């Protein structure tokens, strides 16, 4: 969980070909009805990929709560979820 002041928030994470990979849920400001799924599985077969998704674009400048919840996919040998960065403006 992060609390950051911003009006734009991006989340960067790794997708990998080392399947299965864990997935995560992104929840912004406790709004669980609009949660985003961050899937660590990359469907191509040529290598890993950095994914960047917008969590907030030109929103209100204030302190926002950013939660990343890792799904329990019941897979002991899954590749860990890798959060690369939060990008704030």
Image: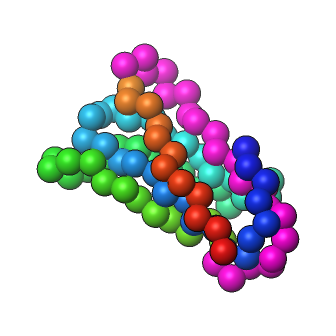
Question: Residue 22 location, x and y as percent?
Answer: 45, 35
As drawn, which residue projects farthest toward the right? Answer: 62
Report the residue at 44% width, 47% height from top. Answer: 39
Residue appearing at x 60%, y 46% in the figure: 25
Instruction: From the viewer's perspective, tell me whether residue 6 is left or right of residue 78.
Output: right
- Note whether 84 is above or below 18 in the view shown: below
Q: Residue furthest top?
A: 76
Q: Is residue 36 magenta?
A: no
Residue 72 at what x, y percent from top left? 55, 27
Q: Which residue appears at 64% of the width and 39% of the height?
A: 69
Depth order, front residue of 80/19? 80
Total numbered labels placed on residues in the image: 0
Q: List x then y, in percent, for residue 73.
A: 49, 28
Residue extent of the magenta highlight:
57-77
Camera sees residue 46: yes
Quarter of the image with the C terminus is bottom right
Identify the residue at horizontal 84%, vertical 71% (top origin): 62
Q: How is the image coloured?
A: rainbow
Residue 70: name its quadrant: top right
In the figure, 84 relative to 6: above or below?
above
Horizontal side of 43 relative to 1 (left or right) equals: left
Q: Quadrant of the N terminus?
A: top right
Residue 66 position by quadrant: bottom right
Q: Is residue 31 above or below residue 77?
A: below
Q: Looking at the image, which residue sits at the far bottom? A: 58
Q: Is residue 63 magenta?
A: yes
In the figure, is residue 17 to the left or right of 10? left
Direction from residue 68 to residue 81 in the image, left or right: left
Q: Nearer the viewer, residue 7 or 17?
A: 7
- Whether residue 31 can be seen here: no
């Amino acid at each position: 969980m992060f609390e950051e002041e911003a009006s734009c928030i991006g989340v960067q994470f790794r997708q990998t070909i080392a399947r299965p990979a864990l997935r995560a849920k992104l929840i912004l400001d406790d709004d669980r009805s609009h949660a985003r799924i961050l899937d660590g599985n990359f469907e191509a077969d040529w290598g890993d990929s950095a994914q960047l998704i917008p969590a907030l674009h030109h929103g209100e400048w204030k302190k926002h709560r950013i939660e990343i919840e890792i799904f329990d996919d019941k897979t002991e040998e899954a590749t860990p979820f890798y959060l690369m960065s939060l990008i704030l403006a």
